[in-house]
Amino acid sequence: MRVPPFLYSLYERFLRGQLNSTKRPLHVGLIVDGNRRFALANGLATRKAGHMAGSDRLQDFLKWCLELNIKIVTLYGFSTENYKRSSEEVEELMSIILNKFRTLQADPLIADENVKIKVIGRRDGFSQEMQDEISKVEAMTEEHDSFQLNIAIGYGGRAEIVDAVKQIGEQIKAGEIEIDAIDEDMLSNHLYTEGMPDPDLIIRTSGEERLSGFLLWQSAYSELYFTEVFWPAFRKIDFWRAIRVWQQRHRRFGK
């Protein structure tokens, strides 16, 4: 049953009033899931329509984060495991991602809110056209420093750690560092998220309760929030519920 707009507005204001204005996550990780099931549940003509609906939700989510003064979002858009899907679906996803990068370049929100965009993951599997668009959007926003959007595509948490270890190994081989100098900080500084704080909160949509390789190293002390809502149907109130739960938890950091 569809909630009347005036009731939704009342609940939104009620929920907003429950949030602690002085306690905000600095970095939110987001695993967007459920596009295909959303398409099926809503009678959309194609699977691609579900993925497109999910793509369209990104700018809304950015606005909600900016409203709460959250500074960093890392979005899990396409994993290394997603290459195992049918070639047709992979091509559909790559087409949607390519168009999203072009849309972001033209979106006034990115310039007006000083949003920096960084793509994390292995790029060697992308077309040259995709790599060119990634370079464009990163160069265009390189000097922006009010908000950072990390888009993880061609990404796998294990692959990220392997790449970091390879970089450190090359430095040892070149005589630039000693093996005894390797510690957690050094490994962190060779990850794709070098220089960024670890995520305070990771949200996954669609009811699945696992990280699926997302930020494996960085999520050691992250709070996890799982919601049944499919990503294309994710609303501001769903996001605020996640923030409310995060604010109610006591983070112990292993203590």
Image (cartoon, grey):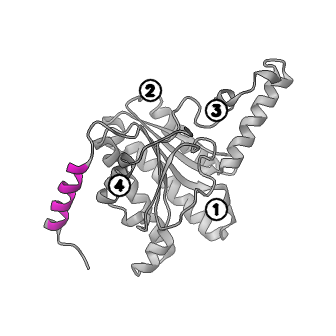
Sequence order check: which comes first, mark 4 or mark 3? 3
The answer to whether the residues at label 4 and label 3 have Cβ atoms under 8 Å apart is no
How many residues crowd around disc 1 within 10 Å: few (fewer than 14), some, or many (20 or more)? some
Q: Is residue 201 left or right of residue 193?
A: left
Sequence order check: which comes first, mark 2 or mark 1? 1
Q: Secondary structure at mark 4?
A: helix
Seen in the picture, residue 32 relative to 50 is either above or below; the reply is: above
Q: What residue did someone put label 2 on?
A: 143
Q: Nearer the viewer, mark 3 or mark 1?
A: 3
Q: Main secondary structure of the magenta part?
A: helix
Q: Is residue 223 left or right of residue 191?
A: left
Residue 88 location, x and y as percent? 62, 70
Q: Nearer the viewer, mark 3 or mark 2?
A: 3
How many residues crowd around disc 3 within 10 Å: few (fewer than 14), some, or many (20 or more)? some
Q: What residue did someone put label 4 on?
A: 239
Residue at mark 2 to residue at mark 1: CA–CA distance: 32 Å
Identity, as a three-letter code, of the amino acid under mark 2? Glu
Q: Is residue 10 magenta?
A: yes
- Mark linked to residue 82: 1
Q: Secondary structure at mark 3?
A: helix
Sequence order check: which comes first, mark 3 or mark 2? 2
Identity, as a three-letter code, of the amino acid under mark 4? Phe
Q: Nearer the viewer, mark 4 or mark 1?
A: 4
Identity, as a three-letter code, of the amino acid under mark 1? Asn
Residue at mark 3 to residue at mark 2: CA–CA distance: 23 Å
Q: Which residues are magenta?
A: 7-18
Sequence order check: which comes first, mark 4 or mark 1? 1
Q: What residue did someone put label 3 on?
A: 188
